[in-house]
Amino acid sequence: MLDVVAALAVVALAAFVIMPRPRSSIGVAELSAEAVRVSGEFRKGRVTAISTGGVVDVTVDAGNHRIQVDGANPISIREEVVLDWVTSDQCPIRNGSRALRFLADGRSCGGVMTLSANGKEIELRVDWLTGRVEMSPK
């Protein structure tokens, strides 16, 4: 009986060591996907401002990993991604967070968001004059 218990313990230990574990860290592809989602929200805000002829704010809540275009549902960014959001003092504060404001002609107050995880960084730059969103690895 003791031999059977010992054999089962060895098999269980071997299975634990050999069994693949789910990846807990975020890779470059996942980080890029998050950056594309964020840039899509910025672009949606610009297009909405131009098409409605009004002002549209994109609220960035870096602490809670949430981004929301006025009148749309917020998106959540993965917790593993660190967001660093820098804007000018011309950008309004909405709900305690800096918002990226787009005007009817497409201009914005400008901002730079850096998304980082596991030593990799991607930077999103929103040009104040044109409202253009550029994404580049840092």
Image (spheres, rainbow, N blue to C red):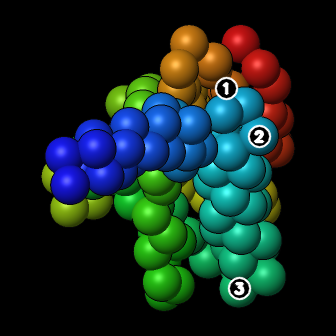
Of the residues shown, which amino acid type is indicated by label 3?
Thr
User: The residue tagged with tag 1: helix, strand or loop?
Assistant: strand
Observer-nearest of 45 and 41: 41
**Quadrant assignment for the N terminus:** bottom left
Q: Is residue 129 left or right of residue 58?
A: right
Task: List x then y, in percent, for residue 12.
Answer: 38, 47
Say which label, 2 or 3, has the lower sequence index.
2
Q: Relative to 52, does residue 44 appear above or below in the rendering? A: above
Q: Which image quarter: residue 3?
A: top left
Closer to the eye: label 3 or 1: 1
User: Is mark 2 in CB contact (under 8 Å) with mark 3?
Assistant: no
Q: CA distance from mark 2 to mark 3?
A: 34 Å
Residue drawn at x 68%, y 26% as measured from the top left: 122
Task: List x then y, in percent, for residue 38.
Answer: 63, 53
Give the numbered dot on residue 123: 1
Q: Which image quarter: residue 6?
A: top left
Q: CA distance from mark 2 to mark 1?
A: 14 Å
Task: List x then y, in percent, for residue 70.
Answer: 48, 77
Check disc 2 and report the residue beneath it: 29
Of the residues shown, which amino acid type is indicated by label 1?
Glu
Residue drawn at x 71%, y 13% as measured from the top left: 138
Q: CA distance from mark 3 to mark 1?
A: 28 Å
Give the numbered dot on residue 52: 3
